[in-house]
Amino acid sequence: MFELNLTPNDDVQSALDRLPEGVLTRVRLAAGRYFQKLRIRRDGLVLEGEGADRTALVFDDCNDRIHADGRPFNTFRTPTLTILADGVTVSGLSIENVAGFGPGVGQAVALSVSGTDFVMTDCVLKGHQDTLFCGPLPYDLSLRYRDFLPDEELHARPSRQRYRRTRIEGTVDFIFGGAFALFDDCEIVVLGKGYVAAPSTPVDQPFGLVFHHCKIRNASGSSEVWLGRPWRENGMAGFLDCTFEGPFASPRFLDWEKPRFRFYETPYGSDALSRPFTQEETERLRHLLADDSSRPGQK
């Protein structure tokens, strides 16, 4: 495996773009704060920091800022780190969008993942609205944004993603998208009034955003915090053996004016808009979680 060691003084994107073709590569980021945007297009790349408390990748693009092309940035041009390749592994990093929250800011993504077989371990993701995008895009947006998003972000390929021992912070719809994404032993921190999960799961995909053995912590004190709402019809989010700290709204989910959606809780909390996983669904998820090859659904 080819190894590349970088520091905050290096132009990381330029270094990634110069990597030799067809060679598995590990990129190590030394401790420090990297005020840079990155796009990873290399399949199988391993990106490592020296720990989420020591190595931070930071940027501040936001939806309401004007892009160089004269348009508002748009949510999907804001990510600090964008993963476009398959089989990428990231560990030991803090990935942050520090644009802030509220009027004049809007959506501001820290991490966007559009590739499949992605694994993140021992990281921190920080943002407010739309912290983590678990792609792909909904089909209607892939059509609407054809004139300014690159083709590599407009696909509708299914994506499998796994997040382990990772803290994710945000306020509004801060984990969203159409992937089958497993969050295992993670801490989900709500910073203000808002919504944790906003799935856009395709109708023929059995699982969407699934949280297993996670701590869902409302750090805001507001009781207007919901576990999820469907970004698109048929969106799926589930909570399996999770713990909850702080006040949460009742009901714990909203329908966002969608006629069909899929919300699950086990143990079941008697919410009007959710139901428990079936035994078959639970066994299938536990089987995937026990597979330490880590990439959900991959055999």
Image (spheres, rainbow, N blue to C red):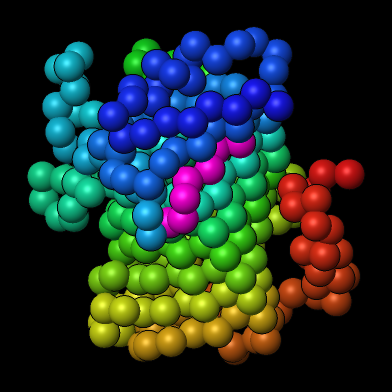
Residue 22 at x, y percent in the picture: 70, 13
- Say if 22 sits above or below 259 in the image: above
In magenta stretch: residue 50:
yes
Image-based side of 24 in relation to 142, left or right: right
- Say if 230 sits above or below 141 in the image: below
Q: How many marks?
A: 0
Residue 95 at x, y percent in the picture: 38, 48
**Viewer-proximal residue, 200 or 79?**
79
Residue 253 at x, y percent in the picture: 47, 73
The residue stretch that appears in magenta = 46-52
- Say if 67 sits above or below 219 in the image: above
Q: Quadrant of residue 59?
A: top left
- Say if 5 sits above or below 89 in the image: above
Image-based side of 233 in relation to 268, left or right: left
Residue located 54% across and 32% down the image: 27
**Viewer-proximal residue, 43 or 47?**
47
Residue 43 makes an appearance in the image: no
**Viewer-proximal residue, 164 or 141?**
164
Residue located 57% across and 74% down the image: 214
**Viewer-proximal residue, 241 or 138?**
241
Residue 129 makes an appearance in the image: yes
Residue 298 at x, y percent in the picture: 82, 44
Position of the C terminus by quadrant? top right
Position of the N terminus by quadrant? top right
Image-based side of 270 in relation to 247, left or right: right
In magenta stretch: residue 116:
no
Residue located 19% across and 28% down the image: 72
Residue located 65% across and 58% down the image: 182
